[in-house]
Amino acid sequence: MIEPSSLLTFIFLIPLLPLLASTGIAIHVLSGRAVGDEGEVLTERLSVGSAVAVLLLLLIFDLAVFFDRVGGLIVVGNWFTSGDFTFPISFAINGTSLALATEIAFLSWVTVSFSVRYLHREDGFHRFFLSLGLFLSGMQLVTLAGNGLLVFVGWEFCGLSSYLLIGYAYLRPTATENALFSFMANRIGDAGFLMGLAIAILAINSTDWHDLATWAAESDFDKVTARLMIFGFLIAAIAKSAQLPFSPWIARALEGPTPSSAIFYGAIMVHAGVWLVIRLAPVLLHLPDTLRWLIGIGFLTALYGWFVGLVQTDVKSALIFATITQVGLMFLECGLGWFTLATWHLGLHALWRTWQFLMASSYMQLIGTGQMLSVPSYLIHRQGLWTAALQRFWLDSLGLGLLARPLLNVGHDLQIFDDRVLARIVGMPSDLSPLDDLSPLVPIGEKGTRQEPEDDRVICGHGLAGILLLWAAYHFQRFESRLILGDNVWMRHVLHEISTILLVTEDLLEQPRYLLLFIIVTLVVII
């Protein structure tokens, strides 16, 4: 355990600074000053400044760990306590986690600097950097957090920002549909992550990576419980890293701007699942059957990405399927127990793929689109394999049919129910066509079109609640005008006397002495 006075106790600033930058951008936008070229200046300074600050801090931490040989679990505080379970805000510091965090910080700085000019004068300029800050904060949590619960917080930050940036051009139906598809696919992985956390808490009352490693090394290690826990975490890992059968979502995620494609799906977030598997290496090494599953998933995903990538007609799609292939090989390496090799592979691939994705726009200008890259002859002469690669092995259609379309249909049905039933009950205007309006207050013409009311109506009611309120108001008005304010002189006189008495009483109660007396009487009655 590191002493509180150590420099590394400030490690919490690494995920905090990008989050503060996003908060500042949000305040800047809400203030109404984020307009025009001048409005971009503050957003640029906050984004670039936080990226540079994180990189410099991590370099300082790297030097401290390298020269002083310090490391371990750093607890900076407790989030909450429930019974005998305490959730600490902890960070697992070692050479590997700091090296990966430093690489992420470097790639973040490069991407943010690139994006400032790439997205200049875009309508969603500030929205892009706000979401990017959330992502960078989440990825640093995923990389450095010392326990699974804190990793899950960063995991969700990444998922939310990914959804926001895939749907960056939200006026395009394709962008919103792809964002929804990716969001739903990753929610399955999140459910697996929660399952793994729950089993870990039940088994050892902790989600710390160090405690899980200690538990796996014990002689009475419960392998059945461990398999269930690892199963949940692996579902999360293969979903986030777009391994089979979750691979189709990542190609749709390219709908977002090119810089987000580079840092999300080319370099950083796609490797989050691999990093989670590496974190769980002490447990996985005691479960050889689970490692064999990793070998199978990684091998099949690598083949899938390789074959589908051969028939792509644009640069970004070819790059993303090459990424799927490489990440599949990383899972294969983890399954073989080569976790150190997988870590090196992850770091080198992230650097190379970021550069390629940031250059994708230039590639598209140079070679154009609509042309397939060089396809091997053995694939061209095998029509079945060729067709399967073109159709992406029908996984995309399967995902749409089993996941996206049913949910979209449910949402459409709920909207119709809201318009036809709920809106009428509460009296809100409906978005339905005039022929669907059941309100009897406005007559329908011969051809089914609405006619303007002949009377100069001031108040109109919508739906059942509106009709009932209008009916009640009408009859109360009749009662008031005919029975109270009509020709009944005696009733008028009585009401005048009552109103005079009430006014006098009100004036008396407003006097300080009577007000004090009223308070004293009230206290006496209460006592």
Image: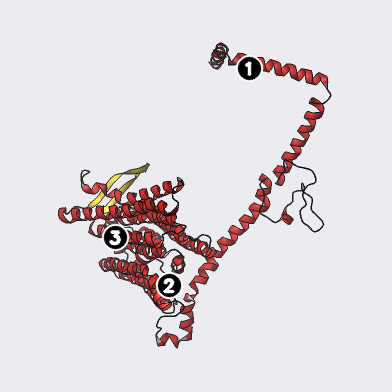
Q: Is residue 155 visible?
A: no
Q: Position of residue 136 (x, y in %)?
A: 35, 56
- What residue does disc 2 label? 317
Task: Decide if residue 156 is on the left or right side of residue 464.
Answer: left
- As measured in the structure, the alpha-carbon distance from the residue carrying label 1 to the one carrying label 3 is 73 Å
- What residue does disc 3 label? 106
- As measured in the structure, the alpha-carbon distance from the residue carrying label 2 to the one carrying label 1 is 78 Å
Q: Nearer the viewer, residue 488 or 323?
A: 488
Give the amino acid type for the residue marked by disc 3 in the picture.
Phe
Nearest to N terminus: mark 2 or mark 1 = 2
Query: Neighbour class for label 2 at 10 Å: few (<14), some, many (≥20)?
Result: some
Q: Residue furthest right?
A: 487
Give the amino acid type for the residue marked by disc 1 in the picture.
Glu
Give the amino acid type for the residue marked by disc 2 in the picture.
Ser
Q: Nearer the viewer, residue 483 or 190?
A: 483
Nearest to N terminus: mark 1 or mark 3 = 3
**In the image, residue 198 above or below residue 357:** above
Location of residue 161 (image quadrant):
bottom left
Nearest to N terminus: mark 2 or mark 3 = 3
Answer yes or no: do the residues labelled 2 and 3 have beta carbons within 8 Å? no
Location of residue 331 (image quadrant):
bottom left
Q: Position of residue 337 (x, y in %)?
A: 28, 68
**In the image, residue 410 above or below residue 21:** below
Task: Decide if residue 307 is on the left or right side of residue 408.
Answer: left
Residue at 51% across / 61% down in the picture? 176
- What residue does disc 1 label? 506
Residue at 46% across / 65% down in the picture? 255
Q: Nearer the viewer, residue 148 or 437?
A: 437
